[in-house]
Amino acid sequence: MPLDQDIQRCIDQCTSLAQRIRNLSNGLVDHRARYALAEASRYMEMCIHGCLDAKEFVKG
């Protein structure tokens, strides 16, 4: 199913981006910048979970 594959590709890209954001955050000393990146990472995780829900909805 093409839609299922598109959703999975989005999940994979978002997962990769969230990991890159976490890696950047770990290298920072400025607490405000770390907090902002942590919030961005959490937002990406919420998007990933929304995509996983959509993928399950499409399946069935």
Image: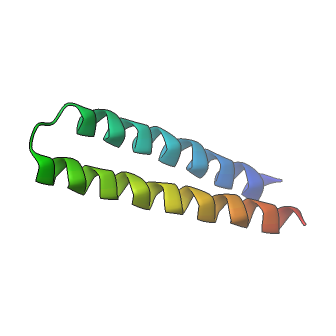
Q: Is residue 30 left or right of residue 34?
A: left
Which image quadrant for residue 58?
bottom right
**Where is 28 relative to 41, above or below?**
above
Image check: 59 left or right of 24?
Answer: right
Q: Residue at x 32, y 58 (%)?
A: 39
Q: Residue at x 67, y 48 (%)?
A: 8
Q: Can you say whether 38 is above or below 47 in the image? A: above
Q: Work out which residue is located at the far right of the displayed protein and give it.
A: 60
Q: Position of residue 52 (x, y in %)?
A: 68, 58
Find residue 9 and report its horizontal and vertical position in percent: 62, 46
**Image location of residue 6, percent across then percent down:** 66, 52
Instruction: Locate the C terminus by quadrant.
Output: bottom right
Is residue 28 rendered to the left or right of residue 56? left
In this picture, residue 2 sits left or right of residue 52: right
In the foreground, 31 or 44 = 31
Q: Residue furthest left?
A: 30
